[in-house]
Amino acid sequence: MASIFETLMLISFGLSWPFNLVKNIKAKTAKTMSLRFLLLIEFGYICGIAAKFISGNINYVLIAYFLNLAVVGANIAVYFINKKMDRKNSVN
């Protein structure tokens, strides 16, 4: 039962990341993004994954962790792309 609630938490929290990713791609600027925040979230997901492996409680919940990790990772990549565009636009 705990795994079900953990999965629901990860899904409900994780549903916001694709929306955030699309918003950041459309914005074409890193001015509204926080790299520290994204890295902290990524660290939290890595810790959750590590806890699953350390406890030996490897189950379907890991899918939600890895999906969220991937989408936040994509947001981090977009941050650097947008940061590069910001530098390019400030020169022009």
Image (cartoon, rainbow, N blue to C red):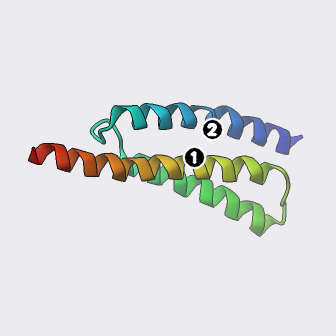
Vertical relation: 2 (above or below) 53: above
Residue at the far right in the pictured view: 1
Mark 2 in CB contact with mark 1 (< 8 angstroms):
yes
Q: Is residue 71 left or right of residue 33?
A: right
- Report the amino acid beneath label 1: Val
- Classify mark 2: helix, strand or loop: helix
- The residue at the point 51 percent across, 49 percent down is 74
Of all residues shown, which one is farthest toward the bottom? 54
Relative side of 91 to 38, left or right: left
Q: Which secondary structure, mark 1?
A: helix
Q: Which amino acid, mark 2?
A: Gly
- Residue with the mark numbered 2: 14
Q: Position of residue 11 (x, y in %)?
A: 70, 36
Q: Residue at x 57, y 32 (%)?
A: 16
Question: Residue 66: image x %, image y %?
Answer: 68, 53
> What residue is disc 1 on?
71
- Quadrant of res 2: top right
Residue density around tag 2, few if under 14, some if 14–19, many if 20 or more, within 10 Å: some
- Gap between marks 2 and 1 measured at Cα: 8 Å
* Residue depth check, mark 2 versus mark 1: number of the one nearer the observer: 1
* Precedes in sequence: disc 2 or disc 1: 2
- In the drawing, does residue 56 fall left or right of residue 77? right
Instruction: Give x and y (percent) for residue 41.
Output: 52, 49
Q: Toward the viewer: 43 or 78? A: 78
